[in-house]
Amino acid sequence: MAEPSNDTIKTDAVIIGAGPVGLFAVFELGLVDIKAHLVDILDKPGGQCAELYPEKPIYDIPGWPVISGHDLVQKLQEQIKPFAPVLHLGERVDRLEKQDGGFRLGTDAGTRLECKAVIVAAGGGSFEPKRPPLAGIEPYEGKSVFYSVRRIEDFRGKTIVIAGGGDSALDWTLNLVPVAKRVVLLHRRDHFRAAPDSVNKMHALVAEKKLDFQLGQMHALEGEGGRLRRVVARREDNSTFAIEAEALLPFFGLTMKLGPVANWGLNLHEERIPVDAEKFQTNVPGIFAIGDINHYPGKLKLILSGFHEAALMAQAAHRLVHPDKKLTFQYTTTSSSIHKKLGV
């Protein structure tokens, strides 16, 4: 984490958000001679990949048949090393004002930055898991109730209840069945919002008696000192039943909050930032938005889409940061100047 300074730091661009798209933006900006500082509220780079699913396999990164969230973040950090970005971790940008020729930003840690381009790559904004409405759940959180899986090994040999019907619930069900003593998937109906392939695999595990699937909703928790013993569930007819469990993983999605970004004069569309699909610039010239936080016709919330957006954004940012320099698009495979920048 960079130490906050009383002096204003001057740089070409500031990237808000150090998730995969923010990290890749460093690379694309570096290719066109734009130096960047990154600011992220988390204490490590990687965004949701690092915070929520570091061990979850990702299948749609070009060139990688499968890669974990952790490994993807590590590879991106290796890729941007030649451009020596400065990271301000554990800080939130809470002030942004326009000035002649650029912007002035301030963080809650006292860091002050001046730049010509601002790139908002904050995913969905500040995020937190949706907590199930269960009385007395707080003492269990972090001990036997978890809203994310940091290490699969932490659940080896345990009896686990996974609650939910979306991608996260199904993905972690499939990944934890091989290591857990027993996994019970609890959902209010036999209909899922997850990828069809995951649903098919889940049903196959149930048929093979490697997974228990129960219809119902969580009703109460039983245990002592934060140690879970049973999850009490309720059926549609209001009858209840108990499931023995050492750990509960409720996956009911995330609550996204834009935070201070909402007060920067940007047009908003359902808590997303509208951009043009040519430069990915917002309604404020010089402020760009890439990744899950932006909105435009045909938008897909995929990491690879964010990578594409970062590439086009960098081309437009070059015209702001280096208005007197003509940019000729160069292929990274043939450009000697790019090879020199990357040290290859």
Image (spheres, grey):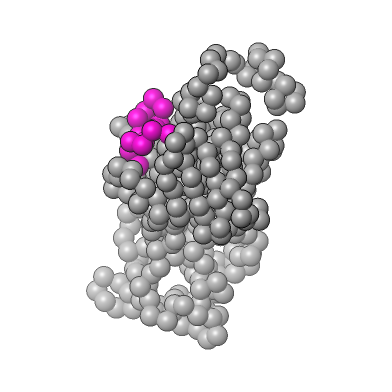
Predominant SS of the magenta segment: loop
Residue at the location (61% across, 51% down)? 7
Residue drawn where x is 44% and y is 77% of the image:
137
Quarter holding residue 158? bottom right
Quarter of the image for residue 165 reads bottom left
Name the side, left or right, on which 159 lies relative to 186: right
Q: Position of residue 328 (x, y in %)?
A: 55, 13
**Residue drawn at the location 24% of the way across and 74% of the way down:** 237
Q: Residue furthest right?
A: 344
Whether residue 19 is visible here, answered yes or no, is: no
Does 2 appear above or below 72?
below
Whether residue 63 sits left or right of residue 125 in the image: it is right
Question: Which of 230/319 is in front?
Answer: 319
Q: Residue at x 61, y 30 (%)?
A: 30
In the depicted view, which residue is nearer to us: 207 or 32? 32
Quadrant showing the N terminus: bottom right
Task: State whether residue 224 is above or below residue 112.
Answer: below
Single out the residue that lies furthest toward the left. 237
Instruction: Give the quadrant of the C terminus.
Output: top right
Relative to 114, is 211 above or below? below
Query: Residue 338 at x, y = what percent?
Result: 66, 20
- Where does the image place residue 280, in percent across and percent down from the top left? 40, 31
**In the current view of this chain or complex, which residue is farthest to the front?**
100
Magenta stretch contains residue 256: no
Q: Nearer the viewer, residue 342 or 88?
A: 88
Which region of the structure is painted magenta? 273-286
